[in-house]
Image (cartoon, coloured by chain):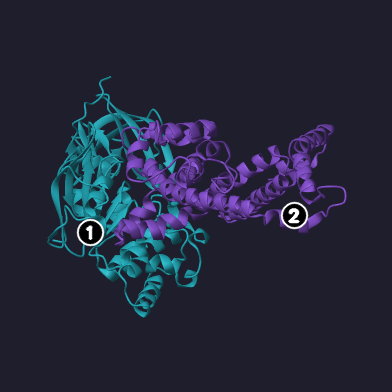
């Protein structure tokens, strides 16, 4: 195991940021810490990096107990949401920083900086100042700087959070490919479930200071441990007291199945290639159904129309713990 | 911004009136009195005596005058050095750490700006004089004299110019935040390395600005030094004290010459400050 976190607790005054966290991450894996803002995931990452201290519990990195080690001795690379590049140094100097601190020979530093700038596609900007780079380029610089010292683990705190949607998507793909090339144990914090599902080998879902579930993206998506994980990983709606994905609901204009529930269409909305239909069942449940544009057109759905809805075969449902609003 | 330019280009009667008022005000308050000093500096003392630059230099070469300027520079040097070191320390403490009494300390740091320098001098005398001072007697017993000697004058100067460095550094420290320092420490830098290579370069212009301001303030310090200094020729007479003494003793020409040098130093400081401000504005 590359990172072993045991029984971590952290409180800020009365606020419990982390409660008895136990996570172990194997070497070479790309892990996402996923959860809503303020759920404690960033705090956990900072505790692993040594930038914050836990009230109790232990952290070991590569088999070494790092609980009491200061950040500079843990050999971790850390990438901040807002880049934290050294503004007064050129791109090359930024990347060289960790190596110069370690007093490596000049030739070796130059060679390694060159190699890393190539890796993050910033070679032509080596002599620029960070202020002359775009946000995406700055974050790639920060990543190269963190990788320069050959850290045993790479930690990224909402690395793409400050970037616009398009750049975020590009960098996300790029991070995955980079990880496949360098194979350094990587942990990144995100509140974007799509990002986590797309990039990570394993996802740790953290909410209100507790680990809700640990698993591969498929496991989490197909077998969510509870209603929180189910609803956080994608859109959900409630049908007969069960949480279900809106695209897992079958909608017909005729009563074809015994288990179908009768409902009335209250609203139909088209967004791009999909249609979102809201129906009100006879027992007063507001259900959202998502179907393709062509399917919706084929059915000819209109507000006020009577329809029958049921869970599609093989659909995943989780009992809803939230009270169904009574009407 | 085109709108601003348009407003600026539109010159009404009010614009000219304001301009006239500001220029007139500055002339009456600053330019005219200072030009008098310059004029008197180079004017002949008596009707048939020599004037001009040569006479000016001659007055400055008087041993008591060189002593006074030497003492002023010594006091200013040590005061600025002390303020730079402590200013950096206090600024880091105030910005980077949370501790009980932080707000009180922050207010205390500003106190020397609002308290009259004469009061500062008096306070130092009360605390350190060998007769009545609280620490004075014990310091005297180990052979250290503060009041009436250079250390006391350095202290008075340092006290008065303390906030200048701190008030320049604090906003910059707050603005740069701690992310870069934390990044440095995760890259293996110790606290000192991170300070020297990351924090210091980020605040260097603010620091330089504060140092120049506090140097200018120290060179011109009068009130606090007057109280703690014996103030006699060759005995604790700084340039500002010399100006007052000579002026009162009808040696006005020397007073003007010394005053001119102080004005020159102040102007020089302003020029330096303008050049320091520029690189900061660019980023």
Count the marks: 2
User: Residue A11 at x, y = what percent?
Assistant: 21, 37
Q: Report the side of B147 relative to B143 (left or right).
A: right
Q: Alpha-carbon neighbours of circle 1 within 10 Å: few (<14), some, or many (≥20)?
A: some
Disc 1 element: loop
Spot occupied by residue A3 in the image (x, y as percentages of width and height): 17, 58
Q: Looking at the image, which is closer to me, B159 or B59?
A: B59
Asked whether, in this view, residue A4 is left or right of residue A217, the answer is left
Residue at (46%, 50%) from the top-left corner?
Answer: B84
Name the residue beneath numbered marker 1. A201
Question: In the figure, is residue A61 to the left or right of B98?
Answer: left
Residue B56 got which mark?
2
Verify CB contact (< 8 Å) between mark 2 and mark 1.
Answer: no
- Subunit of mark 2? B
Instruction: Indicate which label's residue lies in the foreground, 2 or 1.
Output: 2
Q: Which chain is cyan?
A: A
Secondary structure under badge 2?
helix
Quarter of the image where the N terminus of chain A is located: bottom left
Q: Position of residue A240 (x, y in %)?
A: 21, 31
Characterize the local packing of mark 2: few (<14), some (14-19) or many (20 or more) Cα atoms within 10 angstroms: many
Q: CA distance from mark 2 to mark 1?
A: 82 Å
Q: Which chain is purple?
A: B
């Amino acid at each position: 195991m590359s990172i072993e976190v045991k029984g971590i607790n952290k409180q800020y005054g009365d606020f419990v940021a982390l409660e008895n966290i136990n996570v172990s991450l194997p070497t070479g894996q790309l892990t996402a810490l996923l959860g809503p803002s303020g759920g404690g995931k960033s705090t956990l990452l900072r505790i692993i990096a040594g930038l914050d201290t836990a009230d109790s519990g232990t952290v070991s990195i590569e088999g070494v107990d790092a609980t009491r080690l200061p950040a500079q001795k843990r050999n971790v690379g850390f990438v901040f949401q807002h880049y934290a590049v050294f503004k007064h140094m050129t791109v090359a100097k930024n990347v060289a920083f960790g190596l110069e601190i370690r007093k490596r020979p000049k030739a070796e530093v130059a060679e390694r900086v060159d190699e890393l700038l190539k890796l993050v596609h910033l070679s032509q900007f080596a002599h620029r100042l960070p202020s002359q780079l775009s946000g995406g380029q700055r974050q790639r610089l920060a990543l190269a700087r963190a990788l320069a010292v050959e850290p045993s683990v790479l930690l990224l705190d909402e690395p793409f959070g400050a970037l616009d949607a398009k750049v975020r998507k590009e960098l996300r793909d790029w991070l995955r490919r980079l990880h496949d090339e360098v194979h350094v144990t990587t942990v990144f914090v995100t509140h974007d479930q799509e990002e986590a599902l797309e990039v990570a080998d394993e996802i740790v879902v953290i909410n209100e200071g507790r680990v809700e579930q640990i698993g591969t993206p498929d496991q989490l998506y197909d077998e969510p441990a509870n209603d929180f994980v189910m609803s956080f990983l994608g859109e959900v709606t409630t049908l007969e007291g069960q949480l279900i994905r809106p695209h897992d609901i079958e909608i017909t204009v005729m009563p074809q199945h015994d288990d179908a529930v009768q409902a009335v269409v209250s609203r139909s909305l088209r967004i791009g290639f999909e249609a979102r239909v809201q129906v009100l069942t006879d027992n007063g449940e507001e259900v959202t159904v998502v179907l393709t544009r062509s399917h919706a057109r084929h059915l000819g759905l209109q507000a006020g129309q009577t329809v029958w809805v049921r869970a599609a075969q093989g659909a995943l449902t989780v009992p809803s713990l939230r009270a169904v609003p009574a009407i | 911004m085109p709108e601003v330019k348009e407003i600026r280009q539109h010159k009404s009667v009010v614009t000219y009136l304001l301009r006239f008022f500001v220029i007139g005000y500055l002339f009456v308050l600053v330019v005219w009195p200072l030009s008098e000093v310059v004029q008197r500096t180079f004017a002949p003392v008596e009707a048939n005596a020599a004037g001009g630059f040569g006479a000016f230099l001659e007055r400055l070469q008087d041993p008591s005058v060189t002593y006074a300027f030497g003492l002023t520079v010594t006091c200013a040097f040590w005061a600025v050095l002390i303020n730079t070191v402590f200013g950096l320390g206090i600024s880091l403490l105030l910005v980077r750490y949370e501790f009980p009494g932080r707000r009180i300390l922050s207010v205390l740091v500003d106190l020397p700006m609002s308290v009259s320098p004469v009061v500062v001098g008096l306070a130092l005398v009360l605390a350190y004089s060998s007769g009545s001072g609280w620490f004075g007697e014990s310091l005297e017993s180990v052979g250290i004299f503060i009041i009436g000697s250079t250390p006391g004058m350095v202290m008075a100067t340092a006290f008065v110019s303390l906030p200048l460095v701190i008030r320049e550094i604090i906003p910059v420290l707050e603005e740069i935040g701690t992310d870069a320092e934390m990044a440095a420490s995760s890259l293996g830098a110790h606290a000192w390395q991170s300070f020297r290579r990351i924090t210091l370069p980020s605040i260097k212009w603010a620091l330089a600005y504060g140092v120049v301001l506090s140097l200018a303030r120290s060179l011109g310090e009068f009130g606090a030094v007057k109280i703690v200094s014996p103030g006699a020729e060759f005995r604790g007479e700084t340039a500002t004290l010399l100006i007052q003494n000579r002026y009162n003793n009808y040696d006005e020409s020397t007073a003007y010459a010394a005053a001119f040098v102080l004005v020159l130093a102040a102007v020089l400081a302003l020029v330096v400050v303008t050049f320091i401000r520029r690189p900061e504005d660019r980023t």
